[in-house]
Image (cartoon, rainbow, N blue to C red):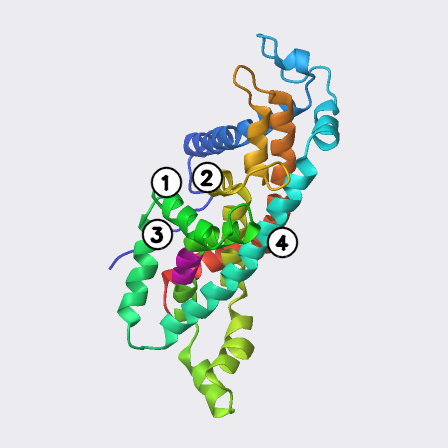
Amino acid sequence: MSRTVNWTRDSRGPVRSIALHLTLIVACLIAVFPVAWLVLTSLKPRQVIETASVRLFEQPTLDNYAEVLRDTEFLTWAANSLIVSLATALIGVLLSATTGYAVSRFRFPGFRSVMWMLLITQMFPVAILIVPIYNLMAGLGLINQFPALVIAYLTSTVPFCAWMMKGYFDTVPVSIDEAGRVDGLTPFGTFWRLILPLAKPGLAVAAFYSFLTAWAEVAYATAFMTGDEKYTLAVGLSQFVGQHKAEWGLLTASSVLIAIPAAVVFLLVQRHLVTGLTAGATKA
């Protein structure tokens, strides 16, 4: 008969406990160091950043932030990124949720083809897709327009999120759908009124992934957008890097400002993230 051993804090020896805590501390320091270095650099004046010596915290100032907000098109780039990211998240969640529910609950002609399409479209890197998508958008007259970016981002977010949502819907008992039909609900009514309220963790993950994909993407935005008034943040930052010199103070200050909206979105959906990411691992 096998015996289950419950490892508790008391069952570990002092050496193992110390080694474990030291490992965790080192891992935390490694994870925090790049972020701390970015923030500290953004608070340094230009003459300190350009020196060869390493100085962690000297002559702190907010001049870099003031220059970014006052003398550049940062706010315009931020507004553009926010519009594109929110549109991508909203449309992406709608399409991935409906697609995931359809392939989870129904077996229709072409079901396998849809599943293969969702899987195969995730295999192509962005470098391969830029040219055909650019030609398609040029034919539609959408170059230098925000809908072009939204459509391009949806080509990568919807397949992944649809697969994830299918896994989540598979964990929702089919008896709920049957109860909805007994009460006279249509398939869409069942999905909208009964299933979606239960799928909030999965929807939160899909929204978070779609938002971050659009917020941090560079390749499509560089190819499709021209002019400061149409740049997104990821492309706008490239304006701080010249042929012979980079404005590290402006770059780091902009990076800190860019991270704030992503952190806010994360805080809003964090309690659903773990549940949504792991829900597809098992089937009820």
> CA separation, marks 2 and 4?
28 Å
**Main secondary structure along the magenta-highlighted residues:** helix
Q: Identify residue for label 2.
A: 219
Near mark 3 (Cα within 10 A), the count class, few <14, some 14-19 or many ≥20, is some
Viewer can see residue 90: yes
**Magenta stretch, residue numbers:** 158-164
Percent of width and height locating residue 210 = 51, 53
Marks 1 and 2 close (CB-CB < 8 Å):
yes
> CA separation, marks 4 and 3?
27 Å
Viewer can see residue 171: no
Tell me which amino acid carries mark 3: Gln
First in residue order: circle 4 vs circle 1:
1
Camera-nearest label, 4 or 1: 1
Tell me which amino acid carries mark 1: Ala
Q: Identify residue for label 3.
A: 122
> CA separation, marks 1 and 3?
13 Å
First in residue order: circle 4 vs circle 3:
3
> CA separation, marks 1 and 2?
8 Å
Marker disc for residue 127: 1
First in residue order: circle 2 vs circle 4:
2
Near mark 1 (Cα within 10 A), the count class, few <14, some 14-19 or many ≥20, is few
Camera-nearest label, 2 or 3: 2
First in residue order: circle 1 vs circle 3:
3
- For the C terminus, the quadrant is bottom left
> CA separation, marks 4 and 1?
32 Å
Q: Nearer the viewer, residue 67 or 268?
A: 67
Marker disc for residue 268: 4
Q: Please indicate whether residue 144 sits to the left or right of residue 277 in the image.
A: right
Identify the residue at horizontal 67%, vertical 15% (top origin).
46
**Is residue 87 on the magenta stretch?**
no
Position of residue 267 relative to residue 48, above or below, is below
Identify the residue at horizontal 60%, vertical 27% (top origin).
251
